Amino acid sequence: MKKLFRQNEIYVFFLIIALVIIITSFSRSFFTLENFFDLLKSHSYEGILAIGFFLVLLSGGIDLSFTAVAVIGMYTGVYVVLITGANNALLAIAVAGVVGIILGAINAVFIGIFKIPTMIATLGTLTAFHGTLMSILQATKKTVISNPPSSIIAFGKMILFRIPDGTGKFADFSLSSAIFIFFTVATWLLLKYTTIGRNIKAIGGNREAARRAGINILKTQFFIYCYVGFMAGIAGLLLGSYLRYIDPLNLVGNELTVVAAVVLGGASVMGGRGTIIGTVLGVSMITIINTSLVFMKIPQYFQQFVIGMIIVISVSITAYRQKLKERQTSVLDVV
Amino acid sequence: MIYKNKKVFSLLLITIAAFLLMTIAEPKIFFSLRNFQSMTVQIPEFGLLSLGMAICMLTGGIDLSIIATANLASIAAATILTKYAGENSGAGPTQIVIVIVIAILAAIVVGAACGFVNGLLVSKVGITPILATLGTQGLFGGLGIILTKGKGIIGFPELFLKIGTAHPGNIPLVFYIFIVIVLLLGLILSRTFFGFNIYMIGANPLAASFSGIKISNVLTKVYMTSGMLAGLASIIMISRVNSARSDFGYTLLLPTVLIAVLAGFNPNGGFGTLTGIVIALFLLQILQSGFNILGSSSFFKNVIWGVMLLLVMVINYIGDRYSKRVRKQLA
């Protein structure tokens, strides 16, 4: 039981409970299944991006290019469906995923083969990827797709099941939410029960030790970045189908929100530490904070300040506790 | 003395090559006084921000909040300017000058205060700089939004706007300011204990702390310097666009990191020279102005930046491996 309280995630969980209670006291319509399913649906793409980012963070790296990959995946997926006339959402998903894998592989080449530090490499690919897309689009004068094919729209609206709440309204559980949950569980299983998952954690913990233990760093890195790319592409498509408007200027520039969510969930920027549950909690917290400000009728321009304050406070608490712990033990590292 | 290491020298060659290329591509427009003036006007505000980022990166850290700090500082200065020396304030010339000086000082002080908060979080509380400055970016930016309610502040006195538009000796005044700051910073980094300590902390924090350097003091001062540079940059910013907003310039954040890496800065800290920064700034400005003149879209310059960054890193990697192989053969 004591071990449970030592984990970071438990504090985030309590904070979320506290927030939910506060918000519900302001506005009863918050604590409804309908609202929760709605929040889940509209933020499912963010959740998937966070899971991908978390995986990279776990391996000791940082991938800042995921927004560009998502947007490119979104655009090419819908574009292919538009051009070929095949009104099939599955085609869009497949294309988005493949594009994501390819872009992720490019990242892996720079990070794994040329040994460029991950933040720098993904900064470069972020600007290069997004710039390439926008340059090509601007040359054709068509920068947005405002009428996506009907299959994409239907995909965005698809509901898996509904739960009636007795007053004639329904709580709709959408396909996007299911996809998010699927990826979350899949990644959790990957990390817990497969060799590659354990390799990822090992690399993040101590890369040199992992190399000496025989882990193939290059292969693992290729896997990680292709996996992240794949998820980013799918997430982009989810966003596009939800908004019913394909705008490649979306998302890019908001990378830090996802980073904040993952970090709030207890993942360490150094790598090797963090849990899927923590990431999910972090995303939930950011989502709840964002929407709760609306419910509490706090003017929107307070939002950024409040989120910044929460990040600073929660990260301070984590870091300070870490510092106190480190004062008790001395760390000798093999460089 | 700051020596020209291999990376900076190759960067210089690339810059010269880019300059020649652009001149050949559009000789009349590129190689003109007007273009040079336009380039040297755009460099300072971005350059000061890049300097601030670079100093933080020397210690192995980063300052993601630098744009938000600049915006906050600009809001402070703008409020003072419009309230006490604006168009409707009926202030006399002497009062205007005094208010301008106070406004500039206010921007620098606000920048220093923001930097102080960053320094505290990084050194005393022990948060990694990426996270600390991520949080403070939201904090400062949010504060700016709250103060301005999303609107811009306009109505600066004429004299203040002259800062951005004056061209003594055909060179923009802001460029002189920039050069002075670069020289000052360069002196500090190369000739003072403070500068020396910065490099030491970046190269090996453990050894630095054991050799008596007070890491928390130095780090706090570093982030305060970055904040003050942001404050100065904000003055240049608002004197050129004649308004202060809370959301201005966020697209400049990642390029400042690009500049530092192009200049040969090690993201883990400890290595990097200001000469490299200045050369990298010129390179990027040459490319940007050149491509603008050639009529390519503004997103294309992003592609060039990204590709250039990756190219430079790959070349550095190959160069490092080649020199290691040569060294092995000689040993």
Image: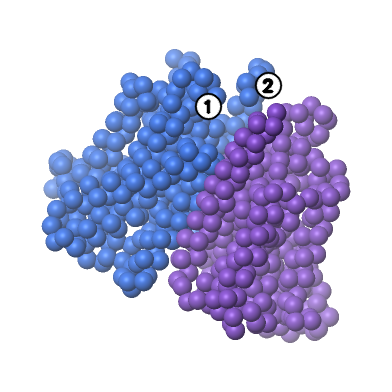
- Residue A204 in view of the camera: yes
Q: Which residue is mark 2?
A: A327
**Quarter of the image where the C terminus of chain B is located:** top right
The numbered dot on residue B93 is none
Q: Secondary structure at mark 2?
A: helix
Q: Whole-percent x and y of residue A294?
A: 40, 53
The residue that appears at 34% across and 46% down in the rendered structure is A102
The chain letter of the blue chain reads A
Q: Whole-percent x and y of residue A185?
A: 29, 30
Bin the neighbour count of mark 1 within 10 Å (Cα to Cα): few under 14, some 14-19, many 20 and up.
Answer: many
Q: Mark 1 vs mark 2: tell me if same chain.
A: yes
Q: Which residue is mark 1?
A: A207
The residue that appears at 31% across and 34% down in the rendered structure is A184
Q: Identify residue type, mark 1.
A: Arg
Q: Whole-percent x and y of residue A281?
A: 40, 35
Quadrant of the rendered image containing residue B44: bottom right
Q: Secondary structure at mark 1?
A: helix
The chain letter of the purple chain reads B
In the depicted structure, whether residue B289 falls above or below residue B190: below
Query: Chain under label 2?
Result: A
